[in-house]
Image (cartoon, rainbow, N blue to C red):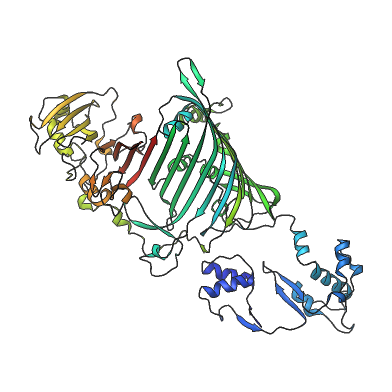
Amino acid sequence: MSPTSSLTVAVLKQLCKDKELAISGKKADLVSRLLKYGASEEELGIEVEEESEGTEIIEDEEGELILESEVVEEKEIFEADEVLEAEILEAEILEVELVGEDEEIPTLIETALGTRFSTSEVDWKKTAALVASLLILGGGAWWWFSLEAQPFTPDPLRHGDEMGFAVTGGEIVATGEYASKVFEWFGSDDEVCELNVDFSGKGSIEIKEGDSTDLSGETGNDRLGAVKQRGGSGFSWLTMEKALQYDFDDVSISKSEQLKIGCQEMPSVSARVGIDWTEWVEISGQNTLRSQFDYELTHPDGHLLGEVTSFGLGGVIDSLDALGMGASMIFAPLQVHEVLGNTLIDKEAAGNVSGWSWRVTGSEEFGDEMAWKILFQNKDLEKHCLGHATIHVLVIPSSPWAVRQSTDLLITNEDSSNCGTLEEILGEYAMPEGRLELRMSIEKTSLSRGEHLVDLGLSYDSKPDFSALRPPSSEMQDWASNNQMHTPDNSTKRSHSLELAVSCIDVFNTPARDALRDYQAYIWRAQDNRADSSKTTWNMSWLANDDLSGWITIDVSGTTASSETCTIISEGMHDDAPTHNRNAIPESPSIAWMESNRWLDGGLFPEFSGSDGLAAKNGQWHSDLKLGILVATTGFDLPDSLDFLPVNDAGRTTIDGIRSWDEGDWSHTFTFAADATDGQILGWSHVWSSD
């Protein structure tokens, strides 16, 4: 005897969804999975069914009713060899032992077709022959009818999903400012006018599966599979962790440098590039909580490694998405359910999503499955004369990602002859000069599926209280409206605070002192240098209400301001001044509060300020780290050295730091930025290289 369930496959799949379990597999798999995760036999309608002779009505893997005869012998139907040789079954060669003419066979037909027939309504001999044909054809008939891809709804992601893929035909062409930006990103200051990169290799994409240790603070295991991760304020959240890896082991790089005689092509070099991009999406708000972009470049002249961590931002990819291009679709395998949702994919399917239009263009075989071909096109790029972007993908029911994907991207402002005024403005002023081209193809090489569905949009017990993310109201200071001169510092972690440095300005008769006293000036940029333990060198830029701006550099020692403890190193005036606007400056806590409650707590950010932190060690800033303050107001453009700071909005105050050091054969550079209105770390970058 064998245990069976009286429920249909469709009902069992719904129970799996309700219990957040996978819905793949045969009926027996679904029953086994539900029993494993606590469903009762009564709930599943399980009963012990006696083995019996005769004809049974059963369900196939898709829940459709089919017929199965367990007692009819081959010789009672026809000789198997005749079928194999004929390849085409004809009703005339089928002979079946039939029931008596006076007997009806409604039960068999009505169960399969949902309609009651009798011998008076149909030729039951032909009906029996048809049934026998279907029984013998079995899987062969299913294969024949499946030569066209079947409609399906994309399967959501599960924790533990992973797909490996090959990368072929990769090509990047960058000219003008695009080429310079790429080399600047990798730490080079070469004036590059054109870059060509050919690449191939392999990659993988994975949804990490957390364990029970990630569920501390939860009252149950409902969110099992989620991964706990810290955000920019140091609090822990439950997330979906997505990891994308590339290993480009065959890379050819050629560039042209801007020399006095013009743009000259340099010899090409071979290289190897590795890229790891990990994103943590908070499962309740479905927003990026944190992302990390690691890269490694090995070339004949040396080795370059980098780590870029951002909080609440997606780095380069999300920056492009902000332009409405959906650029993340281009650089990673397309996650079908994320893009198309519960849309039924069939030969008539089409739509629009994230600025892209898409449509099914046909089907073709992929391995032993039939796949739908889908074309994505970005119409906005063409409409605004900014280039084009097309993605061709193959999708199958068993994979949450596209199993084949070909990308063709061009971003440029070089061809605006057929554009209107708005498009010409966008092309000329909103985009960098030059063009960026990307072509690459990926194809699935392996796939494994996880068990637990990813829970996006659902809350959880340990979710931080949003009120705890902000500093206490008692710590907030509206210094700009109160005609104070600078962002409050009051640090006890550094020997000489900004308050002491500004007091030193008042010791000497300088334009800076006059502006601060008489013209409601404030410090809009300041940076310390603590490399000499006996003093701190402060470089401060001030801005008066007549929009005059200047700078002053002072050495500060001791604990009070005097001519003995303060020394002016240099001073001068800025040629270009930002706009004076105290009303646009937000209130903020002191830097001392943010140091103690955010940045220097090694338990919150171990890699930033732990026992081997990049910015601080065991709660103390590294002495070679320069700490800076930037107050951005309306009409202010950042200098090139600070263009990594996210201060596009007027009235934003940012804390930044930079540190450079040598360790063995490696040269290191570390930078970070934080929001001075709440202490949240925005991100950091660590680059190290060797010759």
Q: Residue 474, can we see it?
A: yes
The one nearer the camera, 548 or 1, is 1
Q: Position of residue 269 (x, y in %)?
A: 52, 30
Q: Residue furthest front?
A: 664
Residue 637, above or below 615: above
Identify which residue is drawn at 46% across, 43% down.
318
Q: Nearer the viewer, residue 241 or 348?
A: 241
Q: Residue 188: x percent and y percent? A: 41, 30
In which quadrant of the rendered image does the N terminus lie? bottom right
Residue occupying image coordinates x 36% and y 40% = 686
Task: Count the numbered circles shown.
Answer: 0
Residues 441 and 146: in front is 441
Question: Measured from the top left, where is residue 487 in percent x and y?
Answer: 21, 40
Left or right relative to 557: residue 296: right
Residue at the outermost top position = 261
Residue 328, position as x, y percentages in the image: 51, 44
Q: Is residue 386 visible?
A: no
Location of residue 416 (image quadrant): top right
Is 418 above or below relative to 214? above
Q: Residue drawn 41% across and 62% down?
A: 459
Residue 585 sits above or below residue 244 on the image? above
State the quadrant of the C terminus.
top left
Residue 266 placement, left or right of 664: right
